[in-house]
Image: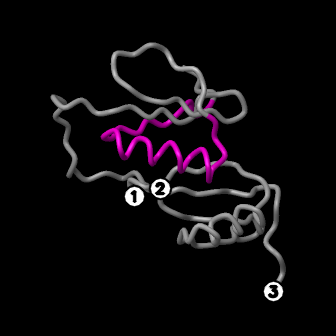
Amino acid sequence: MTTRGLDHINLRADRATLDALKDFYCDLVGLEVGPRPPFPHFGYWLYAGGRPVVHLYQAGADETRLTHGATTFDHVAFQCEDSAGVEALLRGRGIAFRKAVVPASGQLQFFLSDPAGNKVELNFGRERAAAP
């Protein structure tokens, strides 16, 4: 088998949280709602660069899934541009975030949480952190 890359992440939530997640990933991360197959459950597919990279689907009332188990998931990362604009947007909306710089490369990263508490990395790989 040859793996060509990561296809998408899937987040499952109740309808109110689903809508908050859609708004977060569209308004702050810059994804766009796009076409989605006619699955029997409600949801959104969010696109970046013409590809559906985040799938959101509404949990059914009859679904039972483990919600308290241990996981090794830490965060999802997005390649982004315009760190100054994104930083102003986050500060303007009062969204807490942490800035980090990758050693040696100097790449700038912002870490924050989405409305469901998932950690998100915004990676400005083509931008370098300003020298102190």
Report the number of discs: 3
Whether pointer 2 and pointer 1 mark residues with C-beta atoms closer than 8 Å, the reply is yes
Of 69 and 91, nearer the camera is 91
Mark toward the viewer: 3 or 2: 2
Mark toward the viewer: 3 or 1: 1
- Mark toward the start of the polypeptide (3 vs 2): 2
63 vs 81, left or right, is left
Give the residue number, with chain letter if any, for mark 3: 132
Residue 13 position within the rendered picture, expressed as x and y whole percent measured from the top left:
33, 41
In the picture, residue 53 is in which quadrant?
top right
Residue 58 position within the rendered picture, expressed as x and y whole percent measured from the top left:
34, 32
Give the residue number, with chain letter if any, for mark 2: 114
| Quarter placement of the C terminus | bottom right
- Mark toward the start of the polypeptide (3 vs 1): 1
What element does badge 2 sit on? loop
Above/below status of 53 relative to 127 = above
Q: Which residue is drawn at 82% across and 61% down?
A: 127
What element does badge 1 sit on? loop
What type is the residue that disc 1 sits on? Gly
41 vs 129, left or right, is left
Q: Which residue is drawn at 45% across and 48% down?
A: 20
33 vs 85, left or right, is left
Was residue 11 drawn as part of the magenta stretch in this picture? yes
Disc 3 crowd, CA 10 A, few/some/many (<14, 14-19, 20+): few
Q: Residue at x 63, y 50 (%)?
A: 29
Above/below status of 116 relative to 97 = above
- Mark sitting on residue 117: 1
Question: Label 3, label 1: how many angstroms apart (C-alpha)?
Answer: 31 Å
What element does badge 3 sit on? loop
Residue 31 position within the rendered picture, expressed as x and y whole percent measured from the top left:
63, 40
